[in-house]
């Protein structure tokens, strides 16, 4: 699919409605994501006829390739214009989901989920580049917080749609869910196409040199690695904690759903407020550091939930979940600001694509690592995991200072106080 070149016009004063347009697009495609997440495994097993092992292997391979593809697709967004790239990649995601309707063999499954993962990872990078062009630097983290809240709301609605399909448990119901997801991404493409165009920032020459820039930026790679470690919180709430509750605590089974609802609801209600004070690199580093402390505290609280009476275990688990989501929101806000501020001008797409690799890597590595630590290691495993969060958060400051020395003078600053950087903190 060819990408239209953006007109040679900078959007120095983007429309006030651009953040609302981005949030609406996020809400729409998240409805499809939520429905897909809760039903895809059963669709692949009961309708397509695949074993759980083959499904897991295929998805792992697909997300691994998608993670790698995010960098060149982000670079393409820089070179050709982020609005055109986001529209094309949202449309490609819609087509790939529609392709799942026709999958009836493992080979077809691999091809389609590979296309889906590549389009999704590329869309994430291109959308970040588009946001950077449409939103003033000091407002980007706040806008991302609103997008996160909108995304969680959409996922909650989509999960409700998926729950209906799970209740019906028929091929037609699962196919309808895939149709909803495909239509949601098509709608997302339409909404993104209505946003103002942003001038392509990659320049006209030195394409090979520019495309490899982020891959040679070792300080930024270290920042990305530390962020990936902290993103292990994702499979913690969705996989490791439910298994811990089921196997090591006396808490009622419904507590798993309750904690997931608490996490989603807290992000919807408080992510924007939590991110409001993060306007520059110094504040971003403090936010990530405090996120590491809070996630260590949550792990320590979860660790003592085993062996308690049912009601006591539930109270302790809720306390740990509150600490975890608070740390999650602090870490997310800081990470967004850091990723934007350390990316050189005109290269947001490839840098955001590289930084975004942390999400699929955490999803691939996290389940094995966390189940080994938490389920196999018990209290000690929880404390080791919390120590990883704490260490990654503490190391982010020195890593960002090193990366800032590399990019100072070349990257735009998103700080609320332009005269102060992390180097002066």
Image: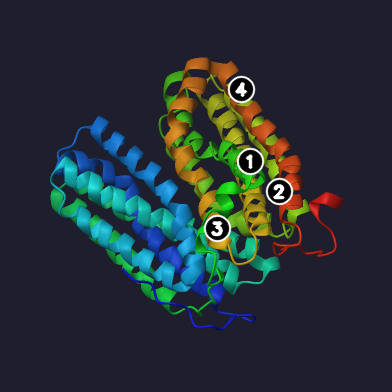
Gap in angstroms between the C-alphas marked 1 and 4: 21 Å
Gap in angstroms between the C-alphas marked 3 and 2: 19 Å
Evaluate if marks 4 and 3 touch, with contact meaning CB atoms under 8 Å apart: no
Q: Which residue is mark 2?
A: 403
Q: Which residue is mark 3?
A: 209
Q: Nearer the viewer, mark 3 or mark 2?
A: 3
Tell me the tag on residue 222. Answer: 1
Disc with the residue nearer the chain's start (1 vs 4) = 1
Evaluate if marks 2 and 1 touch, with contact meaning CB atoms under 8 Å apart: yes
Which element carries disc 4, helix, strand or loop?
helix
Up the image or down, 25 lies above or below 212; here it is: below
Q: Nearer the viewer, mark 4 or mark 3?
A: 3
Gap in angstroms between the C-alphas marked 2 and 4: 28 Å
Disc with the residue nearer the chain's start (3 vs 1) = 3
Gap in angstroms between the C-alphas marked 4 and 3: 41 Å
Disc with the residue nearer the chain's start (4 vs 3) = 3
Q: Which residue is mark 4?
A: 384
Disc with the residue nearer the chain's start (2 vs 4) = 4
The image shows residue 116 at horizontal and vertical percentages of 32, 53
Gap in angstroms between the C-alphas marked 2 and 1: 9 Å
Disc with the residue nearer the chain's start (2 vs 1) = 1
Horizontal side of 376 relative to 65 (left or right) equals right
The quadrant in which residue 84 appears is bottom left
* Mark 2: few/some/many CA within 10 Å (<14, 14-19, 20+): many
Disc with the residue nearer the chain's start (3 vs 2) = 3
Placement of the N terminus among the 4 image quadrants: bottom left
């Amino acid at each position: 699919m060819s990408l239209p070149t953006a007109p040679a016009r900078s959007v120095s004063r983007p429309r006030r409605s651009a953040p609302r347009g981005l949030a609406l697009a996020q809400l729409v495609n998240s409805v499809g994501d939520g429905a897909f997440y809760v039903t895809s495994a059963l669709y692949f097993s009961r309708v397509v006829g695949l074993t759980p092992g083959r499904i897991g292997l295929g998805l792992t391979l697909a997300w691994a390739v998608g993670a790698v593809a995010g960098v060149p697709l982000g670079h393409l967004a820089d070179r050709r214009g982020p609005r055109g790239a986001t529209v094309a990649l949202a449309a490609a995601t819609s087509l790939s989901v529609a392709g799942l309707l026709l999958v009836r063999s493992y080979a077809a499954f691999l091809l389609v989920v590979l296309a889906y993962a590549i389009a999704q990872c590329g869309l994430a990078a291109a959308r970040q580049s588009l946001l950077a062009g449409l939103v003033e630097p000091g407002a980007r983290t706040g806008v991302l917080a609103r997008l996160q809240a909108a995304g969680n709301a959409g996922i909650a609605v989509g999960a409700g749609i998926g729950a209906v399909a799970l209740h019906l448990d028929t091929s037609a119901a699962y196919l309808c869910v895939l149709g909803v997801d495909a239509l949601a991404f098509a709608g997302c493409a339409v909404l993104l196409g209505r946003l103002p165009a942003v001038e392509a920032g990659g320049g006209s020459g030195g394409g090979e040199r520019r495309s490899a820039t982020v891959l040679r930026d070792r300080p930024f790679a270290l920042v990305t690695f530390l962020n990936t470690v902290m993103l292990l919180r994702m499979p913690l709430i969705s996989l490791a904690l439910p298994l811990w509750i089921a196997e090591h605590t006396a808490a009622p089974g419904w507590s798993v759903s309750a904690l997931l609802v608490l996490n989603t609801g807290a992000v919807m209600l408080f992510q924007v407020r939590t991110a409001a004070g993060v306007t520059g690199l110094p504040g971003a580093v403090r936010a990530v550091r405090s996120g590491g402390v809070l996630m260590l505290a949550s792990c320590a609280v979860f660790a003592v939930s085993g062996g308690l009476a049912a009601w006591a275990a539930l109270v302790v688990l809720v306390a740990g979940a509150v600490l975890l989501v608070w740390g999650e929101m602090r870490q997310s806000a800081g990470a967004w600001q850091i990723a934007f501020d350390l990316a050189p001008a005109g290269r947001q797409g490839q840098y955001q694509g590289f930084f975004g690799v942390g999400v699929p890597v955490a999803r691939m590595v996290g389940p094995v690592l966390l189940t080994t630590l938490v389920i196999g290691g018990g209290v000690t495993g929880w404390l080791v995991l919390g120590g990883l969060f704490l260490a990654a958060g503490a190391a982010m400051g020195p890593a960002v200072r090193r990366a800032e020395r590399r990019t100072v003078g070349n990257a735009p600053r998103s700080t609320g106080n332009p005269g102060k950087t992390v180097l002066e903190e």
